[in-house]
Amino acid sequence: MNNNIFRIDGMTCDGCVSTIKTKLELENDISKANITLDDSRLELFSDRNYEISELNKILSSVGDYNVSNNSKNEKNIIMSYFSTYKPIFITLGLVLLLTAISFYNTENTMDGFLRFFMGYFFIIFSFLKLQNVKQFAISFSNYDPITKRFFKFGIIYPFLELILGIFFLTATLLLFSNIVTLFILIPQSIGIFKKLKNNQAIDCACLGSSFNVPLSNLTIIENSSMCLMAIYFISVSMI
């Protein structure tokens, strides 16, 4: 999916924003259009790159609006990405901070660092989901194949994450915990990949119902990293 930033002039109110957004999202190749009135900014998520002339032609029927190139396109894309996924980056930063503190004060080994990271990862993300378990399960069922088939799995999932976090932090039942980690993360990663491949714009449930963060490759990277750690621990335990 392409993500491009444009400048759009001629907007005077929220009604203009709504009109432009509706018109653009009616196009088959455009999955989402984020528009901000204050800085005249248009962020376009589309299956292909649109020329400025094409966008102006599309909008010509709804008003006197003018789309132009943004000279700071790449910078704005990066800033927009970090702004959109800021809650995830802050949460991961907290996980890393707590991991570093525990690593410094206890066992200074790579295994210890990975174990603490997995423990804090599961605990912090589970707390976010536990704020509204039912709403999390509903969102989670949009891409997790297990929850889609067995909705109750989405209900118990936050509690399962919490238990796994405790097991990792206390070094309890590690082989079991790593196997369960693979069992719950691999299917949802496959589900996320399918949704992204089909260009379906849905919210990620990883932060529970507290934040509306679009589903992206960032979640696949998170899950893949956790799976690699789990595979590492499983392989070490079998040697």
Image (cartoon, grey):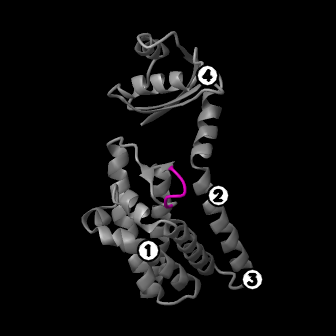
- Crowding at mark 4 (Cα within 10 Å: few <14, some 14-19, many 20+): some
Estimate the spatial distance between the alpha carbons at disc 1 and disc 3, rounded to whole Å: 26 Å
Establish if 51 lies above or below 223.
above
Q: Are marks 1 and 4 in contact (CB under 8 Å)?
A: no
Looking at the image, is mark 2 or mark 4 nearer the viewer? 2
Does residue 239 appear in this view?
Answer: no
Q: Which residues are magenta?
A: 208-212
Q: Is residue 35 magenta?
A: no
- Residue 231, numbered label: 1
**For this view, does 88 lie left or right of residue 103?**
left
- Crowding at mark 2 (Cα within 10 Å: few <14, some 14-19, many 20+): few
Residues 208 and 75: in front is 208
Q: Residue under circle 2? A: 90
Estimate the spatial distance between the alpha carbons at disc 2 and disc 4, rounded to whole Å: 28 Å
Q: Earlier in the sequence, mark 2 or mark 1?
A: 2
- Residue 105, numbered label: 3
* Secondary structure of residue under mark 3: helix
Q: Position of residue 20 (x, y in %)?
A: 47, 22
Q: How many marks?
A: 4
Q: Residue at x 49, y 66 (%)?
A: 129
Kind of residue at disc 4: Asn
Q: Earlier in the sequence, mark 1 or mark 4?
A: 4
Kind of residue at disc 2: Ile
Estimate the spatial distance between the alpha carbons at disc 2 and disc 1, rounded to whole Å: 26 Å
- Residue 70, numbered label: 4
